[in-house]
Image (tube, rainbow, N blue to C red):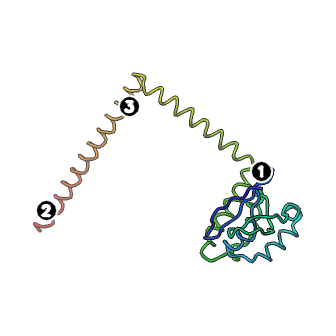
Amino acid sequence: MKTNSIIVNGKEILILTEANEKFVAIKPICEAIGVNYETQKDKILSDEILGSVTPLRGATGSDGKEYKMRVIPFRFVFGWLFTINPKNVKSEIKDQMIKYKMECYNALFDSFTKRSAVLKEKTEYQVEIEKLENELKEDEKYKRIQELKASISNATRRLNSMDKDIISEQLDLFSKEGEEE
């Protein structure tokens, strides 16, 4: 069994790899986010799915000693974290936990409504449009259209400037008339 680790909120989280599956130690995650390990362990073990996939595994700790650790397959970590009430985590990560839960809700919605497939389709259309626009940029007619649009824009700016000058002159007339009386 291979052991790696990552640091989350100052805590070392062990990641064990066994037969091409990654397992994550539960207790360090609980400590990193500030939830009670025993409570989470009991909740996990009583869950029909999580309880069946969270074995005790031997792992070498950061101190070099061998420990038995309760682990959860990496692919289940996100679902377990989704079940944790943000009110129970460290105050400094509460907002992050709420944001995480919102992302989970959105991911579930996208997955079950096939929204992500439509988003992918939309992206493909946008990429195709960009490609065609880039090809068109080389066409002389397209270049002429762009020049004409720039000329229109320039004429509009000049008109707006003239309108401002006329309004300013008119206001000056009114203020001068008021001064004479």
Q: Horizontal and vertical percent for residue 127?
A: 56, 35
Q: Residue at x 76, y 75 (%)?
A: 37
Q: Quadrant of residue 16?
A: bottom right
- Left or right of 52? Residue 105 is left
Q: Is residue 167 above or below residue 84?
A: above
Q: Residue at x 12, y 67 (%)?
A: 179
Q: Amino acid at mark 3?
A: Gln
Q: Is residue 90 above or below residue 55?
A: below
Q: Residue at x 70, y 54 (%)?
A: 107
- Left or right of 26? Residue 11 is left
* Frontmost residue, 179 versus 164: 164
The answer to which of marks 1 and 2 sits earlier in the sequence is 1
* Frontmost residue, 58 versus 41: 58
Residues under numbered marks 3 and 2 in contact, where contact means CB atoms less than 8 Å apart? no
Number of the label disc, if any, that sits on residue 146: 3
Number of the label disc, if any, that sits on residue 112: 1
Q: Horizontal and vertical percent for residue 156?
A: 31, 41
Q: Amino acid at mark 2?
A: Lys
Q: The residue tagged with tag 2: helix, strand or loop?
A: helix
Q: Which residue is tagged 2?
A: 176
Report, in whole angstroms, how far the alpha carbon at label 1 lies from the one at label 2. Answer: 70 Å
Report, in whole angstroms, how far the alpha carbon at label 1 lies from the one at label 3. Answer: 44 Å
Q: Residue extending furthest front?
A: 64
